[in-house]
Structure formats: structure tokens, C-alpha cells
Image: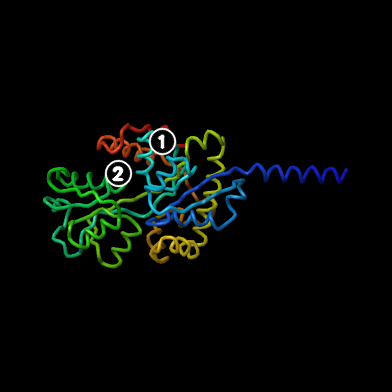
Amino acid sequence: MIRGAAVVLLLAASARAAAAEEIRIAFPSVGTVIAGNIGAVLQKTGIMKARGFDAAITPLPLGRELKEALAADRVDVIFTSEANFIVLLGQGVPCRAIGTFGSMGEMALVVKPESPIRQLSDLKGKKLATIFGTSLHEPAIDWPREAGLDPRKDLELVNMRGMGPMNAAFQSGDVDAMVTFDPYLTQGVERRDYRVLRKTGLDGIVLMSGAYESAHPGAAKKFNAALREAAFYVAAHKEETNAWAGDLSGMPAALLAEASKGNANYNAKTLAGIDLRISPAYREKLARLGRFFFEEKLIPARPDVLHSIE
């Protein structure tokens, strides 16, 4: 009987191991705060395995590549920006927002320290660089408008293909101002390359493909439990995880630490202090962003944002 019971236990353990759910995760390796740390934690620890996942975890350098990977069914989950969520929905890609990391730093409209532009209204007749279809697009429209300018008539919005070209145009003087984000923002301020005219928070979002969620009922809840543990690992091992993220991004660990300070989860003292839930206020922000992208004709269809949130 004892031998039989032992066999039953071994078979049960084998069945649990065999039932591990395969999942493909992609996270940003460049130009990110917090998300890169959490992605690295999932790569380097056994958190996913302990939660019953057989995970393939891939760093991708750009938001565009993350978005394309989910749309092409090459991955099941991505850590990305709120703008990419809206674009995917507007393009008809089934996906759901299952959580948020909270602050991934800030984005800001900046000029050079010696620039004669002292306030947003001084942008009249100037060139403002941004990246259309990203989280940097909305403030490039809304902030000049709030200062009494018509962003389509009173200044020239310059669409750049990425942060590299935009920084080059800014440094050469081809544009007078730009909208940038962390960690580049913190780096530029520390180097005294930028003077900030206006800034706001930029949150990170976790997306799961509709196909994966349908095929794996309950996976989102189990995945979020693993994600909470990873976020707490970051909070408890800041120096280590910033070094991991820095190795991927080429950014100094100290810079990532500075840009992460505003994230509540980064400062959590216990696992209970980690909160990845999407708040009512954040839901409304996402819905507003959906309206903005549709009205600006950046996406072909108006997204059903509120029904695409866990």
C-alpha cells in the first residue's frame, strides 16, 4: 500500500509538471524603465516555472517590434506602452490589458537650456519633434493647444522614426523642441541637455493575446500572480535588477534607478504592496487615448478600449 501510494504521488507530480502551460513573453530591452527589470527577472529566476508556466521570454528592442510580434502571433504576452495597446485594438488585433506596472517614468516636452522658448506658447512658428502613433504623440498635440496654439497651423509637428533620429535632429538644431521619455529624459536633464517645459507620467501595460486567453482560461490570473512576484523581486533587489536591465539597454544602472523612483511598486516593502491592477482613472485615460488616436486618424477603427481591459 505504501508503495502504491508513492507511485500515485509520483504520477500526480508528473502530471502537474506535464500540465505546465507554454507561454511566450516579450519585453522591451531598450528605452524602458521597470518593464526591462521585470522581464529580466522572469528570465533569470524560476518564478514562471513555480507558477506552472513553461515560458519562453524574449527581449525585443522597440515598441514597434513588440506590437508586431503580438499581432503576428509570435508571442502571447507583451510588456509595452499604452499607445501600442490602442494601436493594436484599432487595427483589429484581439488582445486584452491584464495589468499595469504603473509609472515607467515620465515623458516631457523639452528644449535646449539656452533656447529662447520659455513657455509652450513660445512654440509658435517653431518645429516640434515627436513620434506619431506613440505615447509621445498626444502631448505634442494637446500641450500646445492648451497654450492657445493650433498645433497644425501655429507650429510644425515633425514626425520622427525613432528616438535616435529625433535626438539627432534636436542636437543639430533641425527641430526646436521635442517630446521625449524616460530614461532618455532623466539622462538629458542630468547632462543639462534639456530644459523641461511640461511633463507627465507614462505608464506601462501588460497585454495578453485574445487567442491565448481563450485557449488558456485562468492564465491571466495566474500570470499576474507571477508578475506580482517579479515586481516585488525588483523592489527588493533594485541594484541587481537595474544592472540586468542596464546590460540589455546599454543604460547605466544608476540612471534606471533614478528614473524608476516614481513607481509605487518599485518602492514596495512587501508583496502585498505590489499593485498591478488597472484603476478606474487609468481606464478613463486609456479610453481618452483611444478617442485621440481615432480622431487623429492614426488607427482605422475606434477601439473598444473599456471592454478590452481585464
Q: How many marks?
A: 2
Q: Residues within 10 Å of mark 2 (few under 14, many from 20)?
A: some
At x 46% / y 43%, what residue is drawn? 99
Depicted 257 relative to depicted 75: above or below? below
State the SS at label 1. Answer: loop
Q: Quadrant of residue 286?
A: top left
Say whether residue 37 is left or right of residue 203.
right
Give the amino acid at mark 1: Val
Q: CA distance from mark 1 to mark 2?
A: 16 Å
State the SS at label 2. Answer: loop
Depicted 51 relative to depicted 43: above or below? above
Q: Percent from the top left, x then y, of residue 243?
A: 46, 65
At x 61% / y 50%, what residue is drawn? 49
Say whether residue 129 is left or right of residue 257.
left
Q: Percent from the top left, x then y, of residue 24?
A: 52, 46
Q: Quadrant of the N terminus?
A: top right
281 or 128: nearer the viewer: 128
Question: Which numbered disc flags the more N-terminal residue, 1 or 2?
Answer: 1
Q: Quadrant of residue 166?
A: bottom left
160 or 187: nearer the viewer: 160
Q: Percent from the top left, x then y, of residue 18?
A: 67, 43
Q: Quadrant of residue 30?
A: bottom left
Q: Mark 1 and mark 2 in contact? Answer it, CB < 8 Å.
A: no
At x 26% / y 36%, what residue is drawn? 297
Checking the image for residue 40, the label placed there is none
Q: Residues within 10 Å of mark 1 (few under 14, many from 20)?
A: some
At x 41% / y 60%, what residue is drawn? 249
Label 1: which residue?
Answer: 93
Give the amino acid at mark 2: Gly
Q: Percent from the top left, x then y, of residue 251?
A: 39, 64
Label 2: which residue?
Answer: 133
